[in-house]
Image: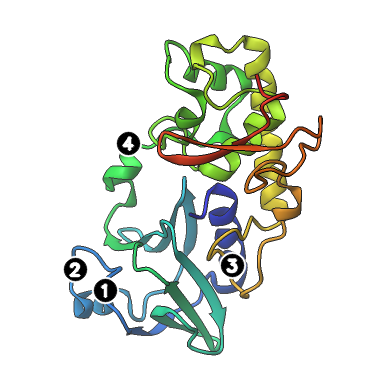
């Protein structure tokens, strides 16, 4: 699933290319990603509208078309955007944009959700969403963990707790901080939390700089893969030597998700 760095990369790239342009035509090849509205009404509401801003909240992408009109896209596991001159493979919805662009919304497994909303902040998953990591200072970050007793890795992935962090970057941040993914949140010291905060902020910023991690279907809007995979220290490195101590990286299912860690460096 695209996480914060991937969705932020898409937001930045689309904003650079299509901000201020008009939606001239909409082709719906498969209606299934569109929720709570018919295909025809979806087309009627967005056609001829101008894209006045592109926002992100957690893993959700928001296209502002007017003061009370938004396209809200939750890409989930297998959604991505390609901006090109062609209709792409797995395109489900194609927005013809002024200037000759085709904005292809692709989804190989049809798990994503697209909605038209008058106020994107009313979407239930957004109303329940935790704070944006990159907008926190250390003191605010530390306060989040007060009275928490759950395992640290599932907690970091909980979108109601912290927005945008998923399976990849929770594992990378915990490895960087030397914290075992099954440690209870109330058993982690303030100094360890300080290091976790530093690691998480650094990793997220670097991943955005490198345009994300293409570990599944995620692509940049030009179709290229993100460039962060060479910087991953534990994710998908089972049985490969730890970059720190050379101990083989282990994989374990934690809260239903495959989790990679170093059994020696992460305590």
- Disc 3 element: loop
Pointer 1 local density, CA inside 10 Å: few below 14, some 14–19, many at least 20: some
Pointer 3 local density, CA inside 10 Å: few below 14, some 14–19, many at least 20: many
Foreground pick, 54 / 203: 203
Residue 38: name its quadrant: bottom left
Mark 1 vs mark 4, foreground winner is 4
Decide if residue 165 is in sight here.
no
Location of residue 141 with respect to 252 vertically, above or below:
above
- Residue that numbered label 2 is attached to: 37
- Residue that numbered label 3 is attached to: 219
Mark 1 and 3 residues: CB-CB less than 8 Å, in contact? no
Left or right: residue 239 compared with residue 80: right
- Disc 1 element: helix
- Residue that numbered label 4 is attached to: 128
Who's the residue at 65% across and 44% down the image? 238
* Label 1 to label 2: alpha-carbon separation: 10 Å
- Disc 4 element: loop
* Label 2 to label 4: alpha-carbon separation: 23 Å
Foreground pick, 184 / 240: 240
Who's the residue at 64% across and 55% down the image? 212
* Label 1 to label 3: alpha-carbon separation: 28 Å
- Residue that numbered label 1 is attached to: 45
Mark 3 vs mark 2, foreground winner is 3
Foreground pick, 39 / 92: 92
Left or right: residue 244 compared with residue 55: right
* Label 1 to label 4: alpha-carbon separation: 27 Å
Q: Quadrant of the C terminus?
A: top right
- Disc 2 element: loop
């Amino acid at each position: 699933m695209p996480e914060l760095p991937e969705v932020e990369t898409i937001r930045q790239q689309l904003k650079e290319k299509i901000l201020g342009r008009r939606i001239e035509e909409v082709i719906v090849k498969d209606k299934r990603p569109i929720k709570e509205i018919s295909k025809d009404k979806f087309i009627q509401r967005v056609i001829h509208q101008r894209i006045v801003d592109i926002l992100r909240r957690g893993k959700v992408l928001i296209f502002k078309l007017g003061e009370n009109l938004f396209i809200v896209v939750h890409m989930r596991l297998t959604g991505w955007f390609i901006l090109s001159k062609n209709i792409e493979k797995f395109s489900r919805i194609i927005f013809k944009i002024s200037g000759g662009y085709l904005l292809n919304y692709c989804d190989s497994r049809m798990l994503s959700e697209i909605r038209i909303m008058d106020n994107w902040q009313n979407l239930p998953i957004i109303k329940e969403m935790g704070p944006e990591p990159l907008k926190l200072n250390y003191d605010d970050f530390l306060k989040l963990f007060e009275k928490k007793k759950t395992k640290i890795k599932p907690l970091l992935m909980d979108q109601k707790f912290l927005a945008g962090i998923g399976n990849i970057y929770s594992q990378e941040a915990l490895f960087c901080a030397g914290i075992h993914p099954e440690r209870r949140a109330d058993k982690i010291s303030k100094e360890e939390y300080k290091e976790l905060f530093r690691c998480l902020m650094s990793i997220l910023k670097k991943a955005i700089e490198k345009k994300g991690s293409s570990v599944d279907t995620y692509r940049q809007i030009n179709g290229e893969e993100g460039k962060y995979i060479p910087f991953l220290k534990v994710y998908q490195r089972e049985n490969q030597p730890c970059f720190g101590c050379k101990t083989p990286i282990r994989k374990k299912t934690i809260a239903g998700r495959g989790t990679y860690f170093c059994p020696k460096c992460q305590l």
